[in-house]
Image (tube, rainbow, N blue to C red):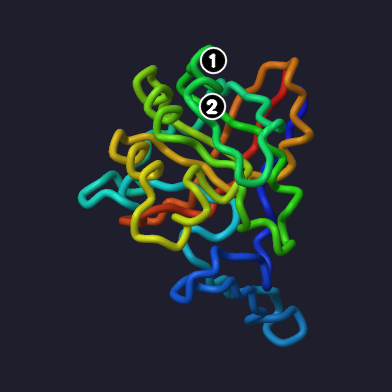
Amino acid sequence: MKIIDLSFDVENGMPTCGTPWHQTVKVEQMGTIDTVGRNTHSILLGSHSGTHMDAPYHFIKGGRTIESTPLETLCGPISVIDSTRFKAGDVVQFDDVKDLKVTERMLFRFDWFKHWKTGDYYKAFPFFSEGAINFLIENGIKLLAMDTPGPDDVKNVNSVDSPIHKALLSNDIIIVEYLNNTDQIDLTKTHTLVALPLKVKGSDGSPSRVIIFEE
């Protein structure tokens, strides 16, 4: 069995979504072995920094918060969909998903993670149409994962309106974003997802360690 780590490192200077109100990531030394006999660090970051998970509360008033997300949703078999044909600004349409077998957990592999730490990461990444997302919702998806900054059109990243996020989260569907290393996934194999957020009470989301077991 192969284990693939789909998470970005949490580090100083890592990209965030670019909104003026978003917390930049700060990892700073507090104690050292030479001064206090041990190494310790402070870690300051936003709930949507790096590889992370969105809970319904992110966009839905009164929605489920991250600590109450069922572990049964976050761990289990996952379908990996080869979406590498979609390039910058392309839209995953209803016709692109209508013949897919929809499962509870689905990962769309665009290989967009390769743009991480470049000026292109937040520019015109592939995204989903409402028709495509509604098809997945109607057929029972519970977790949608991707290696892009999100399922919405890039113009909605910094907007108050993100219709794809809202469609998913209003149906209690978890979104996992900013995956790394998706090109290491062998699409001919079967896969099991383990995606674990920090158990932050009352939070709209959380940085997460996301791995896949490949058999």
Residue 138 at what x, y percent from top left? 34, 20
Camera sees residue 62: yes
* Front position among marks 2 and 1: 1
> Can you tell which quarter of the image residue 181 is in?
top right
Q: Residue furthest left?
A: 62
Q: Is residue 94 above or below residue 101?
A: below
> Mark 2–mark 1 contact, CB under 8 Å?
yes
> Can you tell which quarter of the image residue 174 is in?
top left
Mark 2 and mark 1 lie on one chain; the one further toward the N terminus is 1
Q: Residue furthest bottom?
A: 35
Label 2: how many Cα within 10 Å (few below 14, some 14–19, many 20+): many
Residue 71 at what x, y percent from top left? 43, 33
Residue 196 at what x, y percent from top left? 52, 42
Residue 57 at what x, y percent from top left? 31, 50
The quarter of the picture where the C terminus appears is top right
Element assignment for label 2: strand
Name the residue tied to disc 1: 100
Q: Is residue 15 above or below residue 29?
A: above
Name the residue tied to disc 2: 106
